[in-house]
Image (cartoon, rainbow, N blue to C red):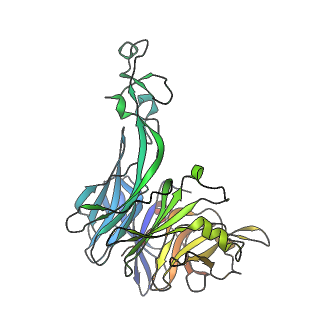
Amino acid sequence: MRNHFSLLLLHVSVSVGSIFYGFTESPESKFVSLNSSSAVIAALWETPLPIEPYVAALDVPRGLVYAVTAEHTVTGVKIFLVAFSLANGTVHYNVSLPFGLYPDGLDRSEGIGHSAGTHTGVQLDVDPSTGDVLIGGMIPNVTHWRPADCQPACGASGGGLCCLDPREGAPACFNVKQCADISEPAGPSQFRQYKMSHSTRLLQEFETPTNQTWSETVSSALDSSGRILYVQLKMDAGTAPVTGMGPQYVYGYDIDTGKIIGAINTTRAVLAAQALFPDIADFEDMSYDPIGKVLVSVSLCIQPQPVQFARCVLLLDPAHGNITRLAPAYFDVQHGSTRVGVDSVLDPTTQVVYEFLPTHDMELVGYSTVTGKVAVDTAIPNVTLFPNNLELGS
């Protein structure tokens, strides 16, 4: 579920409640703060850049907030990492990223592009000890159109160039500078993970998982003390066995060497956990709990009597790959409907994991990672700053 307005939240914990920071959706994205206790939202500064509202990362020690901009062109989406001043929004620098999706929102009458993507799929985490930025995303596999002959000629019919889709073989006139400006998906996208040095701003490519076909990123979670980045990826459903849930893996990266040090088939882990907890439906986006040393997910469960959707807290042990359910007899049916946004964020100080869930109001809901039950439920009064996503800041 998405809304025209959105807010990506970054987290800082204080004694009076959790304070979040985030961007509203473009145009004129505002950087705002939100108090988890009062739900008061305050605008701090704004930027004219086309901010992707679903991803960002906070580096409090260095006074920076990182965001992603996506420039739509006829050859795809050009993506940049932008470093803003946390205090006033001044742009310190930007770095071009090798990711991209396909053009969307383009005028089809102009003939510039047929494929459509929605959001960048980029995931950001900051290493608090070094300031290095961990960046993951998808590189699309595309086929570019080529020149052809049209009858009547395109100049006579008022078009620009005659171009041919290599897969369909139907030439037509398009108002483009070159036929290669039109592209179509040619196969599954490729996942890449990088680390950008805070000092040099150079990208170090990490090891690539090669034994599966990926369709999109899901979430990422950093164990900064253990020096491990966990990346959650969704498989291309056409290449995976049918299990009734979206096929996913979690990979663990050593952030110093860039090597993969572990992989968990979370689909298989959920199916195994259903032997003890048959109400579990999936394992959704994850946060890392540094106290329990587990990956935490507020996931979808099914209450048996009466049958209805509910929320429950799942724990994934990255050392052994098994999933357990907190409070097995507890079902949060109040927030069992469609989620808002993608990611959640865990406050390790209060041991509460937050996400946005709708009832009659839009609510910031926090679940205790100790009891597995709702610990915070705050209505969001300002719907013009509709919160859509959660990201953990450093």
Is residue 118 something that shows in the picture?
Answer: no
Is residue 285 something that shows in the picture?
Answer: yes
Residue 283 relative to residue 182: left or right: right
Q: Considering depth in this image, is 72 or 249 the residue closer to the camera?
A: 249
* The C terminus - image quarter: bottom left
Residue farthest to the right, as pictured: 305
The answer to which image quadrant residue 368 occupies is bottom right
* The N terminus - image quarter: bottom right
How many numbered circles are shown?
A: 0
In the image, is residue 193 above or below residue 323?
above
Residue 381 relative to residue 73: left or right: right
Q: Considering depth in this image, is 188 or 183 the residue closer to the camera?
A: 188
In the image, is residue 159 above or below residue 98?
above
Q: Residue at x 45, y 22 (%)?
A: 171
Q: Considering depth in this image, is 141 or 308 the residue closer to the camera?
A: 141
Q: Residue at x 61, y 70 (%)?
A: 269
**Residue 111: x, y in percent?**
42, 29
**Residue 176: x, y in percent?**
35, 28
The answer to which image quadrant residue 362 occupies is bottom right
Q: Considering depth in this image, is 142 or 157 the residue closer to the camera?
A: 142
**Residue 110: x, y in percent?**
41, 29
Q: Residue at x 48, y 82 (%)?
A: 293
Residue farthest to the front, as pictured: 211
Residue 132 relative to residue 338: left or right: left
In the image, is residue 347 above or below residue 390?
below
**Residue 393: x, y in percent?**
38, 73
